[in-house]
Image (spheres, helix red, strand yellow):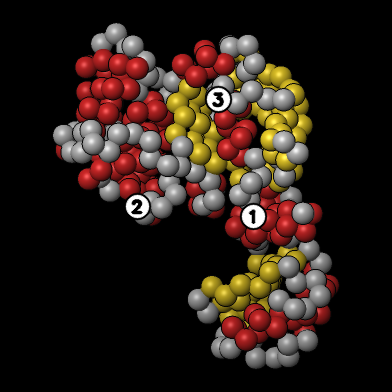
Amino acid sequence: MNDLVIDVSGLRKRFGDLSVVEDLTLQVKRGEICGFLGANGSGKTTTIRMLCGLLEPDAGEGTCIGFDIRRQAHDIRRNVGYMTQRFSLYEDLTAFENLDFVAAVFEMPDRQAAVEAIIERMGLKDRRNQLASQLSGGWKQRLALAACVLHEPKLLLLDEPTAGVDVKARREFWDLIHDMAADGLTTLVSTHYMDEAERCSRIVYLAQGRIVVQGSATSVVGESGLVIFEAIGDGIDAVARRMRQAPGVEAAGVFGRALHVAGMDRAALAAAIESQGGGLEWREVEPKLEDVFIHMLSLDEARR
């Protein structure tokens, strides 16, 4: 296997007349954390399922962890960890029993030692004998992650893994991901959280089954061409409502006492601001990844 853990081109998947993934080409290097972004229905989950051998593509070719995605799907499934948004372990088993069952499924030679090691690594020692149904959302996600990496996969596929989990648990979860990336584990993760996307070494934005933007979070923001003006003052809720109707304004959102107005045409934004009269302090600020994400969603909706 070369340095590319994922190397696919021209992937296509349709369900009846619905095209879900179309001409998708993707390369992910060893140890990289690649974030998948996009609206619901953009093809993220379908792509992940094709990569891990659960769905056969209608067209396209390539390899995943060195195995052909068409002819060697079974080998791929044995060597990846796939974590879905929905908790899929047994609620009526303890954390230890769930992990022991997974070790048995993968026919690990010394499964007792493997389970004890992953319990220690994931900080599950105090919850080893607790039923999965009694775990909080954060601990369930940690247990699910432990089950995914128990058999030491070469690739980790995460489909919105922290949905519904509190901020502290999400941060701890991502610390574990980065620790494993430092050891060479490659991760492909879909997420709607921009703070998580910013922790990825590269992000890929999908729209209608196609990759439209990819690169580091910094480069994606820098190359977006998006212009943001910020105002601070009183009465910004009413101003935001009026600004959303102004030509050239794509979005106008209130954050505390600050109003952010976004668009691609700086002159049109300046004219819209001028039309509101005085009373607010305006300044141009750098866009954030969340601003760009909302912009991309707006473009996606306009194409539909």
| Residue located 28% across and 48% down the image | 136
Image vertical order of residue 127 relative to residue 194, above or below: above
Looking at this view, is 217 or 299 the one in front?
Answer: 299
Q: Position of residue 285 (x, y in %)?
A: 65, 67
Q: Position of residue 119 (x, y in %)?
A: 25, 29
Query: Dot 3: few (<14), some (14–19), or many (≥20) neighbours within 10 Å?
Result: some
In this rendering, position of residue 147 left or right of residue 70: left
- The mark that comes first in sequence, 3 or 2, is 3
218 lies above or below 239: above
Q: CA distance from mark 1 to mark 2?
A: 23 Å
Of mark 1 and mark 2, the one earlier in the sequence is 2
Which is more foreground, mark 3 or mark 2?
3
Marks 3 and 1 in Cβ contact (< 8 Å): no
Amino acid type, label 2: Lys
For the residues labelled 3 and 1, the Cα–Cα distance comes to 29 Å
Q: Amino acid at mark 3?
A: Leu
Q: Which residue is mark 1?
A: 293
- Mark 2 — residue? 168
Q: Is residue 30 left or right of residue 286?
A: left
Question: What residue is shown at x 18% (from left), y 38% (from top)?
Answer: 130
Q: Quadrant of the N terminus?
A: top right
Q: Residue furthest front?
A: 16
Q: Nearer the viewer, mark 3 or mark 1?
A: 3
In which quarter of the view is residue 303 placed? Answer: bottom right
Q: Amino acid at mark 1?
A: Phe
Q: Is residue 81 above or below residue 292?
A: above
Sequence-wise, the earlier of marks 3 and 1 is: 3
Residue 142 lies in what quarter of the image? top left
From the image, tell me which residue sits under label 3.
Answer: 54
Q: Quadrant of residue 281?
A: bottom right
Q: Is residue 66 left or right of residue 196?
A: right
